Amino acid sequence: MDTWQPPQTAPPSEGPLLDTFGRVADDLRISVTDRCNFRCVFCMPAEGLKWLPKDEILTFEELTRLLGIFVSLGVRSIKVTGGEPTVRADLPTLVSMFREAGPELDMSMTTNGILLDRLAEPLARAGLDRVTVSCHSLMPHRFEGMTRRDALDKVFAGLRAAEEAGLTPIKINCVVIGGENQDEVVDF
């Protein structure tokens, strides 16, 4: 098995961007916030985490500049992530800036879906192509136990709104925990 070694040269000034195995890196995950409105048992403690001060989070302009650099290096697909990206104020504006920086990009977002009922349409208009929604149980009591939020109905509403807005195909992420939700795998 090869052991990862840091690159021996500076990154290229022009694409394509290659990993240490010589593969073209054409997809990028951009975390737009460290904050989240869930407290999933497999992700963070019930009391939450200490968030970065807001002045340390990259601005829309800084994020868009970074995206432009990666597009110039051959990135063709981006996934907007977090934390929970929908808690970032004015997210549709950022998505619109990303779309302007990369008109041909395949742009998707991973979300817990709780705010999609009000954001799906504005995000679609801004240029988002589709969403991946994290849903770890179809049973309200299990969902609440895993996310520490009574919000399964809001996630379902967000899924419906995403479909109506054309943010398709919709993918579902599900963390399977033995003794917790493994019996729901087939239902997903």
Image (spheres, rainbow, N blue to C red):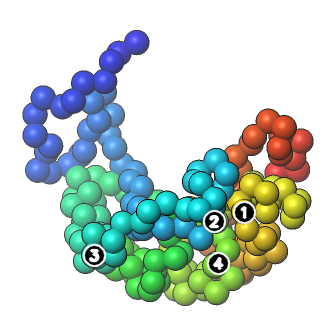
Q: Which amino acid does label 4 sit on?
A: Leu
Q: Are marks 4 and 2 in contact (CB under 8 Å)?
A: no
- Asked if the residue under mark 2 is in contact with the one under mark 1, i.e. CB atoms within 8 Å, the reply is yes
Q: In the depicted view, which residue is nearer to us: 37 or 59?
A: 37
Q: Which residue is drawn at 34% across and 44% down?
A: 25
Distance from disc 3 to disc 1, alpha carbons, whole Å, reads 28 Å
Residue behind mark 3: 55
Q: Distance between the residues labelled 4 and 2?
A: 14 Å
Q: Pick out the residue farthest to the top.
A: 1
**Count of number-bearing discs:** 4
Marks 4/1: CA–CA distance? 19 Å
Residue 54 in view in this figure:
yes
Report the Cα–Cα distance between label 1 and label 2: 7 Å
| Residue type at the position of mark 1 | Arg
Q: In which quarter of the image is the N terminus?
A: top left
Q: At which x and y percent is residue 108?
A: 52, 64
Residue matched to label 1: 148
**Three-letter code, disc 2:** Phe
Q: Name the residue under label 2.
A: 38
From the top left corner, tell me how far across and down residue 114 is, in percent: 67, 74
